[in-house]
Structures are given as C-alpha cells and as structure tokens.
C-alpha cells in the first residue's frame, strides 16, 4: 500500500513528485495552455470557414477542414495515451506540441483546400496527443486531494473553447486574416513548450502497454472511408457510382474486421464485451448523436449568419452564445439534480426531444427571421444538447466493472468525437448538394452579379438588397434543409434514450455529476487503474478533508506506526524491489531533499525494530515486512467497505487492485505522510 512510485514504480506511475504550490501552478498553467490550444482548434475555424472558402475555393471540401482534424485527433488520443506510458508523458506532450505547431504553420501558409485539409490532419494528431497527455500529467504532479479541482478545471476548458473559439476565429478573420486563426498557435505553443521543458518533471512508468495497432488502423481507415463516401456521394460522384459503392463496401468490411480483431486482441482498443452492457451501448449511441449535432451545427451556423444575416465573422461567433448558454445551463442544472436525486435517465430522453425541436425550429429560419427569434431557437437547441451531454460519462462509469472504467470512459469519448466527425461531413454533404443547384438558379436570375458575390459574404453585402435576396435565400434554404434532415437523428436519440437503464449511482459517480467539465468529454487515459484512482479519489474526497483520516487508516492496520514511518517503509520496499537495495541518500535525492531531513524517519523505524540501518543502507526486518503487509491489508479492506460495488471476493477486482496498489494507495498516504516527514 505504501510503495510510492514514479520512474521507479513497478507497475505504473504512482505518487506525484513533490512540487511547491508555485511550481504546481506553473506546471498546471503550461498543461492548461496545451489543452486549450488543442480544444480551441476544433471550433475556432467555424467562423473563418466562409472566408477560407472564398480565398481557397473548393466549397465542397469545407467540412473536411473540421472533419480531418477530428478524425486525426480521435486516432491520436488512442495511441498517445499508450505512448505516454512507454516513453514518458512529458516527452509525448512536448512531441505532440511540436507536431501541432508544425501543422498550424502549414495551415497558415496553405495555398489550396487540399493542403489545408492535410495540415489540419497533422494538427489533429498533435491535438490528440496534447489532450490525453495533459489529463495524464495532472496525475503526475497534482496531489490526489487537490486533483478533483484541477481535473474539473481542465474539463471546463472544453466548455470555454466552445464559447470563445468561434468568436476568436471571427476576430482574427475580420481584423487580421483567417491565416492568423492558425498562426496564433505558434507563439502560444512556444511559450508552453519552454515552460514545460523547465517546469514539468519527467515521470516515466516502467509498464510497457500492448498497443492494438491493427484495431486502431482498421477503425480509422474504415471510419474515414465511410465519412469520405458520405461527403462525396451526390457531390463529387453520384450515389450509384462505383467509387461511392466501393467506399461503402470497403468501409463495412474494415469495420467488420475491426470487430473480429477486437474480440481476439490481448488489449483491445474497444473491447466488444462492453457492448453486452446495455448502458454502455445506449450511451455510446447517444454520445455519437450529441457530437453529430453539436459540432455539425457549430460548424455551419456561422456560414448561415454571415451569408443570410449579413453579420461579420466576429458577430457570427457572438451570435452562437445563446446556444452555448443554453448548453451550460442545462449541463450544470442536470448535474446538480443527478447528484442530489441519483436519477439520470430522464435527462437524455428530454434532451434529445428538445434537441429535435430546436433543430426543427432552426430549419425554419430565413432572411426575415429576427435576431431574438434566432437566438431563442439556438437557445432551445443548446438546452437539449446540455441535458443529453452531462449524463453519458456518469452513467457508463456507474455501471461498468472497475476493471473496465478506463476503456469504457474513453469509448464514450471516442464515439462522441467520431460523431462530431460524421456530423460535420454529413452536414457538409447535405449543404453542398443543396446549395450548388440553388446558387446556380439564383445566379441565373442575376446576370450582372459577379460569381464572387455568391462565395464571399463581404462581397455579397456590398450588393443592393434586391440583388442579395436570391443568394441569401439559397443559403437559408440550403442550411434549413440540412437541419431538417438532422431532426430524425435527434429523434433516433430520443428513441434510443428510452432504453437507458437507471442504476443507483455509486458515490463516485454522484460526486462526479456536478463536474460540468465531464459533460464535454475531455479525453482521458484509457488505463483502468487511472480511472479507478479517480473514482476512489471522488469517494474519499471528504475523508481526505479530515486530518484524522490517515490516523484511522493506520489504526485499522493494527499497529502504532506513524504516517512518516509508514511512508518510510514504503520507500524502503520500493527501492529494494526495483534496485535491490535502499539507502537514505537515494531516497532523499528522489524527493529533492537533504538526507538529513529524512534520516530521523529511518532512525525511528530502526528503534521500532522495523528496519536495520548499516550506515546509509536500510533493510526491512521480518517485523517490518509483517507491518507492511498489515498496511496493505488495511487498505484493501477500506476499499471493500467504502467503494460501491467493489468486493474482494471478485478475482477481477483482486487482480486490478494488485496493479493499482502502488499507484492508488501511495498517493493517498504519501502526500500526507511526506508533508509530515518534511515537517521533521
């Protein structure tokens, strides 16, 4: 129980390195900046897209500026979490930042839409790495008693970017150029890299995870082919063309192969056994639908607002605020109600119904629709999305086995991101298929109007009102057509939500329900030990606020060992297990302390008969080994008594607990004991 671990750990990353409050805040600021950049670039381009299309052309590829980013991000979040375990999270975080910056630079200098789309995919790879490793780095540097606050703040970053992303994109587009939407990442990322290099400690686990390369490749290529077929069908090629039929056929084969591979993989990316849990299946479908609707709408609404309402890029970003405000209101409200009542099933049912109403209302918008009416429609849609978002991760974490916490949580996030990619592609395909003939018809009525007026919102607004009207109507009808087609998707979500089972909430899930950051599905590690640690952290948060908690834990072990002595026993065991010996200078060096600070702790252990001291070399006595075993047993029984749905009679739980022991228990005890040791 008391074996602290960082680079020395046998089985994973354990107790965070010791940092001062100032150092912790600097590290957190650097991590947050990396996460902010990655999350921001999913939404910042939406208001710039009309201007990008006017500059680079290829309006039919517009949605791929977002889709390519999301697809690459989805794959990267799966891979980089494993790479972080293999090569160190700091290293992968910095490498991801370099890839992200490189992609940003190429985006900024792009001379055609294909170049921009490829660069956006590179950006997405870097963004996925930044997101996952940012969440994981928090566990390396933040004490467990404070981690809930910090993780909640990181989750909230995703909500903030939903608000500020489109507005920032509009500001850069209006006052500089759309290229600054990407250039702005460069100086910020350089600052983040510099701070990270100096401030973030290097923590590396000794575990070597098995990576499901075949499964990741199959689902990535299969999903990409499906999205490409949906984008090209009726636009680049007829629906019945060999290219479209071939893409669909190959994608289906690849996705079927993915299912077969996952059933046999040693450590599958998405274990098929999870789908035997109806809650996971329902929440995955709903997560896909929520992602489909949210990012699809966020991507194409600015186009409507700029072409039909004639507002600037900046104003189009601000005009999205009613949608985001509605989303935040119901996310916070539903989280509070779930925490208080323990009931969650009603929220996605109501949310999908309201979402369908909001989409239908928005499909009725046109050039004559007033500002307040449009805002009310967006607000309605936001209310529905917010009600649906908050419950998904909570419901899944509440029902899966603790051994599946990591993969189930990352699975729901995966489906939401995949839904966002499909949403932007399908919205784009429907939009292009409808807009192209509509604009052709409108321009036929306006023989003297230059074609650029139909592609550039600024050029359009310079025309007299009577000349603008046919073009504005074409855009309004096309986007209304898209929203009408998405209404059945929301209604499908309503039907699916009816099948969601309501299971009494675990204490950890009840606590997590009030964290609005979780609603935005910030990517997390798919490691079950990391997720179990978070669940335990939520469960014991109130206990950790009680200074007597550690004393009670030690008393349950049946001895009079002090926290400092317990910490010392753990350090001795760790160094002996990994290096074959333990000595005071090595242990002190690990915590950046003078040996004289720690020597009294080991002297106390010697006097208690728990260790032998031979100069600086320390070894456990038989009594010391026995006491360490008692401390481990006390922790196991505490889990059995306090963690909902956990029982030591379950062999799966025992195996998981054996893996998690160093990583979880040490964080709870070492953080308190280390402070007491330093106080000596």
Image (tube, rainbow, N blue to C red):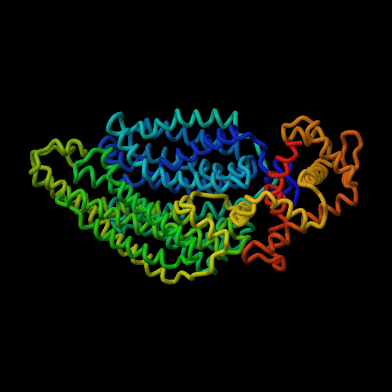
Q: Could you say which is closer to the camera, residue 145 or residue 191? A: 145
Q: Could you say which is closer to the camera, residue 674 or residue 6? A: 674
Q: For the point 11% across and 39% down, which residue is it?
A: 449
Q: Residue 509, how many percent across, how many down?
A: 54, 60
Q: Residue 458, how many percent across, how many down?
A: 20, 36
Q: Is residue 510 left or right of residue 427?
A: right
Q: Could you say which is closer to the camera, residue 463 or residue 618? A: 618
Q: Residue 413, how many percent across, how many down?
A: 48, 54
Q: Is residue 302 left or right of residue 618?
A: left
Looking at the picture, does residue 15 appear above or below residue 422? above
Q: Does the rendering let one see residue 250? A: no
Q: For the point 65% across and 62% down, which residue is it?
A: 642
Q: Quadrant of the C terminus?
A: top right
Looking at the picture, does residue 408 appear above or below residue 66? below
Q: Does the rendering let one see residue 218? A: yes
Q: Is residue 87 left or right of residue 616?
A: left
Q: Could you say which is closer to the camera, residue 226 or residue 657? A: 657
Q: Residue 510, how many percent across, how many down?
A: 53, 60
Total marks placed = 0
Q: For the point 50% across and 67% down, which residue is it?
A: 279
């Amino acid at each position: 129980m008391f074996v602290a671990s960082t680079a020395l750990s046998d089985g994973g990353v354990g107790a965070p390195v010791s940092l001062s409050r100032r150092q912790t805040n600097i590290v957190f600021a650097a991590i947050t900046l990396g996460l902010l950049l990655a999350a921001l670039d999913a939404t910042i381009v939406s208001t710039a897209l009309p201007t990008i299309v006017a500059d680079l052309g290829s309006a039919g590829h517009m949605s791929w500026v977002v889709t390519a980013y999301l697809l690459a991000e989805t794959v990267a979040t799966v891979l980089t979490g494993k790479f972080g375990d293999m090569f160190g999270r700091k290293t992968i975080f910095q490498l991801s930042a370099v890839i992200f910056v490189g992609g940003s630079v190429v985006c900024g200098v792009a001379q055609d839409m294909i170049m921009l789309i490829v660069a956006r995919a590179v950006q997405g790879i870097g963004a996925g790495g930044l997101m996952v490793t940012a969440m994981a780095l928090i566990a390396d540097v933040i004490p467990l008693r404070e981690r809930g606050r910090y993780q909640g703040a990181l989750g909230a970053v995703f909500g903030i970017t939903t608000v500020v992303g489109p507005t920032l994109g509009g500001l850069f587009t209006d006052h500089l150029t759309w290229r600054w939407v990407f250039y702005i990442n460069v100086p910020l990322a350089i600052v983040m890299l510099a701070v990270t290099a100096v401030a973030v400690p290097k923590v590396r686990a000794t575990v070597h995870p098995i990576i499901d390369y075949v499964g990741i490749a199959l689902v990535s290529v299969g999903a990409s082919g499906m999205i490409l077929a949906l984008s090209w069908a009726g636009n680049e090629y007829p629906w019945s063309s060999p290219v479209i039929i071939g893409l669909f056929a190959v994608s289906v084969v690849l996705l079927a192969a993915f299912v077969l591979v996952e059933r046999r993989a040693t450590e599958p990316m998405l274990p098929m056994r999870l789908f035997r849990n109806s809650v996971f299946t329902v929440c995955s479908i709903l997560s896909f639908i929520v992602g489909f609707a949210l990012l699809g709408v966020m991507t194409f609404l600015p186009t409507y607002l700029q072409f039909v309402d004639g507002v600037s890029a900046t104003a189009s970003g601000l005009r999205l605020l009613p949608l985001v405000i509605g989303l935040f209101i119901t996310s916070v409200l539903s989280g509070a109600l779930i925490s208080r009542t323990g009931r969650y099933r009603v929220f996605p049912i109501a949310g999908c119904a309201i979402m369908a109403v909001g989409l239908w209302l928005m499909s009725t918008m046109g050039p004559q629709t007033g500002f307040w009416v449009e805002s009310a429609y967006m607000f309605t849609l936001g209310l529905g999305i917010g009600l649906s978002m908050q419950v998904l991760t909570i419901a899944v974490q509440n029902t899966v086995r603790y051994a599946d916490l990591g993969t189930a949580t990352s699975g729901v996030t995966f489906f939401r991101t995949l839904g966002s990619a499909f949403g932007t592609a399908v919205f784009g395909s429907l939009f292009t298929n409808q807009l192209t003939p509509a604009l052709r018809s409108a321009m036929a009525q306006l023989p003297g109007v230059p074609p650029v007026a139909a592609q550039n919102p600024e050029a359009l607004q310079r025309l007299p009102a009577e000349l603008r009207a046919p073009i504005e109507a074409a855009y309004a009808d096309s986007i209304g057509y898209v929203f009408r087609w998405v209404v059945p998707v929301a209604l499908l979500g309503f039907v699916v939500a009816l099948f969601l089972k309501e299971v009494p909430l675990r204490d950890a899930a009840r606590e997590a329900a009030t964290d609005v950051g979780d609603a935005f599905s910030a990517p997390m590690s798919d490691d079950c030990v990391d997720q179990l640690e978070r669940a335990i952290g939520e469960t014991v948060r109130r206990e950790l606020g009680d200074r007597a908690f550690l004393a009670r834990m030690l008393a349950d072990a049946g001895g009079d060992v002090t926290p400092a002595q317990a910490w010392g026993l753990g350090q001795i065991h760790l160094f002996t297990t990994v290096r074959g010996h333990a000595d005071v200078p090595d242990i002190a060096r690990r915590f950046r302390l003078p040996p004289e600070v720690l020597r009294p702790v080991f002297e106390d252990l010697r006097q208690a008969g728990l260790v032998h001291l031979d100069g600086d070399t320390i070894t456990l006595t038989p009594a010391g080994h026995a006491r360490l075993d008692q401390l481990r047993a006390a922790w196991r029984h505490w889990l059995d008594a306090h963690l909902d749905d956990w029982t030591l009679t379950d062999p799966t739980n025992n195996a998981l607990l054996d893996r998690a022991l160093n990583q979880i228990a040490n964080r709870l005890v070492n953080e308190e004991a280390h402070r007491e040791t330093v106080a000596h």
